Image (tube, coloured by chain):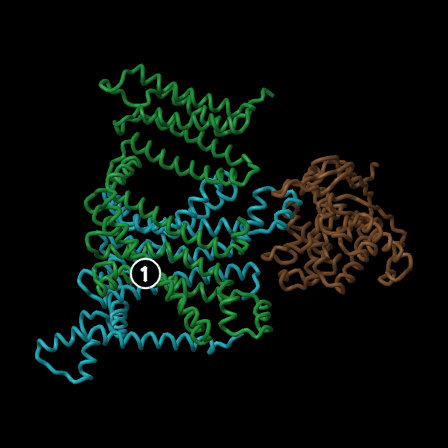
């Protein structure tokens, strides 16, 4: 067992290195434009002034970390959560679609897995397609779902949630098929010697055995669900959400806004995955798993 | 023949594999009476486990007949006529020891009060009182296997089928469990079918030893033990014990079990 | 026992056929198109096919004969139904859909019969394992086609597969140019660079414990992040052409490769490593002779994950701006013009490209890690 400092120190060291490289990159990427700007204005700043200027451009090629942090802070804590410049507002819009899609996707995935495990025909016909569909760039379909549903008058939360559903049910279905089939032959034989019914075998053996698989695939699914919701906001029409912030940022070259939106998206992702992970750990602990 | 717990006649089982048919059992004739402790011994591939699984209706024979308690194995299984102990403890890791023992009782629809009473009784039989709330991984291998025996005893079947239950344990633990198993057998008066590949274990435990050989799996000798019912561990050094062990070894040799 | 054992699918299909008989005709009559008598004849043929199939299926003939009859009946019915609709979209009446459901039940029964057939030969068994899912895929298309044409679903909402197929056949040059731009330029470049970079960093991280302890938690966390969001920045930095898409692909493929390779390098057993120690083998010898081969299944896992991620990354990055060619560009502009069939054509091509990409990596994996239990086992 390694001590806590021995595990945390390297992470901070790498993070510090990333920030340092980022600052160097900020200077390198923003310097040409700043030089150009200064020459036109006829100014000759000192080296230090020049460095400071590369770090304070309103629309830099690469914003400095502190600019991003300031933007995130300003748009998260200083604005009313109802304002359409607030990151909390945009994150909430994306989060609600993510959660709705994730709930549908998980339910659908579990249902499909139960069907595949119990019906041979489904196993033979559906399973190859589920595996094959993972090789397909599903996100390509996202804009069409949005636009086509908008054409029949369905806009807002539902189309995005549908894309999230689509992305999140695959990992859950595949993981649950694995999980429901994870009991060893010996455990299944044991149920047979008790003359247990299919339902009893399912509830007392297959379901508990599949729990670790369910949470592992739900962690993948919720991350996929978030990506689905963000990409669902990219096509025309979306006025709110992290994806729309990315798109407007790219229209107006607001790099700081783009980075802030990315940070917000990452925060949401970490939050969601951590919550699912924590729920998984608590459930497994309640089920008597050996502490890791 | 009315008190025969297991009666097999010209029993055969052929598996279809990718490399062609494999005769796991061929022409097995065997009768096991009530209260006997029968060991099945032989090298791997001799069909001893397969025979146990046929009794348990986990495999279907392809020739001959077999009756368990006078019925077909399927009817016997549905009547919950036997408890089965596997090579590994096969405890459910998400259940505590008492919930594991309760598993067959839940499936058989036994009332909660009755469940509590039986869990207490069977855990006491295998000396696991005090470990009710532990999870399987908190117990040693020997204790886990004892818990799985308790689970097989919990629903009061008269027949206990044990498939190399102590095969994965070290010899010291195994000796201890063998002793305890004999005590348990004397107390419960069950009929026990016990698969093993250890000659001392088979001779020490059994009233009847069935020697088997591979390719095809068949019975080469059935030895009625002359050892007394009371068997301290040091009975293993007695001439009588060694004579029976010798006869088992002869049976194995006659079945070409020592060749490749 | 009369010897007739009708499956539930057969029984239900027969009942549906009976219901359909009372709901005739199949399509709204069209005086100019077909005589009423002909239409009725077609309908009763379809209903007859259901009953024949259900009876043959319930009789004692062999599974192969039953499968053949079910196959002919199910597909014959669909052919009859679709020819009755012709090019008059949206004229189907309720009996059309009832009979379609009956045909689908027969196909389901066919799949059940086929699934239950066991073959001794390996090739025949493999063929059967391919046939059942192929049947399933074909029926998705059949039901899609029949429902869209029968119910007259607006073309914008969902074009029938036949129209998409026609569009693919008619736009081969455009599709080929898009595939060249997106897959051969952006995806492959980014994929190779990203995977190579991930691999090299993984080797470094394996060598230096400090680096590994620092990078692994970050790498694991990044895999959950919506990295695709860096696309607009990359487009700003590297321009509209394929270079920016390749950059997105590099970033997306880097971390899965890093995390999986590091995990794979830790996968070799203690005993094997101790064996190498007893030979006094050097770090690089242990790496090439033991640890990299042991890591191969993990590395291929990353390569497979990345094949999908790379395609997604490149296509989505094109939504943020491209020259006037590329799969993502085509999807976003054609959907703006409501040319839905072209969008579907592009998606079909993307799906095919994704499957081929994945398939090539999977085949390579089978060739390299033939010793691994997951490959040996089938």
Question: The residue marked by circle 1 belongs to what chain?
Answer: C
Find residue B157 and report its horizontal and vertical position in percent.
74, 46
- Residue annotated with mark 1: C190
User: Which chain: green?
Assistant: C
Is residue B64 positioned above or below A62 on the image? Answer: above
User: Which chain: cyan?
Assistant: A
Is residue A78 positioned above or below C42 on the image? Answer: below
Q: What hue represents chain B? A: brown
Find residue C208 and report its horizontal and vertical position in percent.
45, 75
Specify the quadrant that holds the N terminus of chain B: top right
Q: Residue at x 29, y 60 (%)?
A: C246
The reply to whether residue B6 is in sight is yes
In the displayed structure image, the side of residue A101 where residue B156 appears, left or right? right
Is residue B95 positioned above or below C339 on the image? Answer: below
Q: Residue furthest right?
A: B239
The reply to whether residue B190 is in sight is no
Question: Element under label 1?
Answer: helix
């Amino acid at each position: 067992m390694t001590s806590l400092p021995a595990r945390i120190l390297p992470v901070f060291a790498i993070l510090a290195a990333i920030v340092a490289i980022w600052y160097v990159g900020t200077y390198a990427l923003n310097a040409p434009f700043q030089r150009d700007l200064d020459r036109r204005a006829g100014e000759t700043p000192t080296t230090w002034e020049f460095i400071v200027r590369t770090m304070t451009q309103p629309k830099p090629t690469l914003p400095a970390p502190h600019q991003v942090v300031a933007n995130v802070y300003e748009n998260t804590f200083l604005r009313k959560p109802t304002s359409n410049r607030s990151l909390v507002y945009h994150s909430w819009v994306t989060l609600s679609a993510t959660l709705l899609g994730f709930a549908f996707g998980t339910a659908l995935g579990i249902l499909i897995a139960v069907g595949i495990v119990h019906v041979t025909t489904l196993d033979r016909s559906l399973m190859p397609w589920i595996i094959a569909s993972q090789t397909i760039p599903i996100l390509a379909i996202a804009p069409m779902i949005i636009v086509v549903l908008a054409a029949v008058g369905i806009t807002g939360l539902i189309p995005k949630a549908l894309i999230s559903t689509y992305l999140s049910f695959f990992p859950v279905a595949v993981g649950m098929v694995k999980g429901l089939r994870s009991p060893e032959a010996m455990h299944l034989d044991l149920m047979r010697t008790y003359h247990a019914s299919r339902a009893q075998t399912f509830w007392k053996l297959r379901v508990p055995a599949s729990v670790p698989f369910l949470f592992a695939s739900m962690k993948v699914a919720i991350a996929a669900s978030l990506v689905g919701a963000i990409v669902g906001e990219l096509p025309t029409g979306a006025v709110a959400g992290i994806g729309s912030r990315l798109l407007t940022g790219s229209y107006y070259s607001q790099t700081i806004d783009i980075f802030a939106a990315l940070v917000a998206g990452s925060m949401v992702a970490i939050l969601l995955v951590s919550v699912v992970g924590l729920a998984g750990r608590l459930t497994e602990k309640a089920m008597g798993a050996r502490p890791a | 023949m009315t008190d025969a717990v297991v009666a097999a006649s010209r029993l055969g089982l052929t598996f279809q594999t990718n490399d062609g048919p494999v005769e796991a059992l061929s022409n097995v004739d065997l009768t096991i009476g009530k209260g006997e402790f029968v060991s099945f011994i032989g090298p791997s591939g001799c069909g001893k486990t397969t025979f146990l699984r046929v009794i348990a209706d986990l495999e279907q024979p392809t020739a001959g007949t077999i009756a368990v308690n006078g019925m077909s194995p399927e009817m016997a299984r549905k009547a919950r006529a036997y408890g089965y102990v596997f090579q590994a403890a096969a405890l459910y890791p998400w259940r505590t020891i008492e919930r594991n023992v309760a598993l067959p009782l839940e499936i058989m629809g036994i009332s909660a009060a009755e469940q509590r009473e039986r869990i207490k009784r069977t855990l006491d039989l295998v000396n696991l009182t005090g470990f009710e709330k532990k999870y399987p991984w908190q117990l040693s291998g020997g204790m886990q296997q004892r818990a799985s025996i308790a689970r097989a005893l919990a629903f009061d079947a008269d027949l206990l089928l044990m498939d190399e239950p102590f095969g994965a344990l070290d010899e010291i633990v195994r000796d201890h469990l063998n002793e305890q198993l004999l005590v348990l057998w004397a107390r419960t008066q069950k009929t026990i079918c016990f698969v093993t590949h250890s000659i001392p274990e088979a001779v020490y435990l059994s009233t009847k030893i069935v020697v088997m050989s591979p390719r095809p799996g068949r019975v080469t000798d059935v030895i009625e033990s002359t050892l007394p019912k009371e068997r301290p561990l040091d009975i293993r050094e007695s001439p009588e014990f060694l004579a029976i062990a010798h006869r088992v070894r002869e049976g194995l040799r006659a079945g070409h079990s020592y060749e490749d | 026992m009369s010897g007739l054992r009708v499956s539930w699918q057969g029984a239900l299909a027969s009942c549906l056929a009976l219901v359909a008989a009372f709901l005739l005709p199949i399509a709204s009559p069209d005086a100019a198109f077909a005589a009423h008598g002909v239409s009725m004849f077609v309908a009763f043929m379809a209903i007859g096919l259901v009953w024949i199939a259900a009876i043959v299926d319930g009789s004692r003939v062999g599974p192969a004969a039953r499968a053949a009859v079910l196959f002919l009946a199910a597909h014959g019915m669909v052919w009859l139904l679709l020819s009755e609709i012709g090019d008059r979209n949206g004229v189907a009446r309720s009996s059309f859909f009832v009979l379609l459901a009956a045909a689908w039940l027969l196909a389901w029964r066919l799949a059940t019969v086929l699934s239950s057939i066991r073959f001794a030969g390996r090739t025949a068994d493999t063929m059967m394992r391919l046939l059942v899912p192929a049947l399933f895929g074909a029926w998705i298309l059949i039901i899609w086609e029949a429902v869209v044409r029968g119910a007259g679903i607006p073309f914008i909402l969902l074009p029938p597969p036949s129209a998409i197929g026609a569009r693919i056949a008619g736009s081969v040059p455009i599709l080929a140019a898009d595939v060249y731009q997106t897959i051969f330029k952006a995806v492959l470049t980014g994929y190779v660079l990203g995977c190579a970079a991930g691999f090299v960093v993984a080797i470094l991280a394996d060598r230096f414990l400090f680096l590994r302890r620092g990078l692994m938690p970050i790498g694991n966390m990044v895999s959950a992040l919506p990295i695709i969001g860096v696309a607009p920045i990359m487009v700003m930095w590297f321009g509209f052409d394929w270079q920016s898409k390749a950059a997105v692909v590099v970033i997306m493929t880097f971390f899965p490769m890093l995390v999986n390779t590091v995990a794979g390098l830790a996968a070799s057993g203690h005993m094997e490593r101790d064996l190498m120690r007893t030979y006094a083998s050097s770090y690089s010898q242990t790496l090439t002779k033991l640890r990299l081969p042991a890591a191969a299944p993990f590395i291929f896992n990353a390569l497979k994950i990345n094949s999908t991620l790379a395609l997604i990354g490149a296509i989505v990055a094109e939504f943020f701006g491209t020259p006037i060619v590329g799969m993502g560009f085509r999807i976003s502009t054609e959907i703006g013009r409501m040319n839905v069939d072209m969008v579907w054509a592009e998606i079909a091509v993307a799906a095919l490209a994704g499957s081929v990409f994945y398939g090539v990596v999977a085949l390579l994996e089978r060739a390299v890690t033939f010793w691994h239990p997951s490959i040996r086992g089938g």
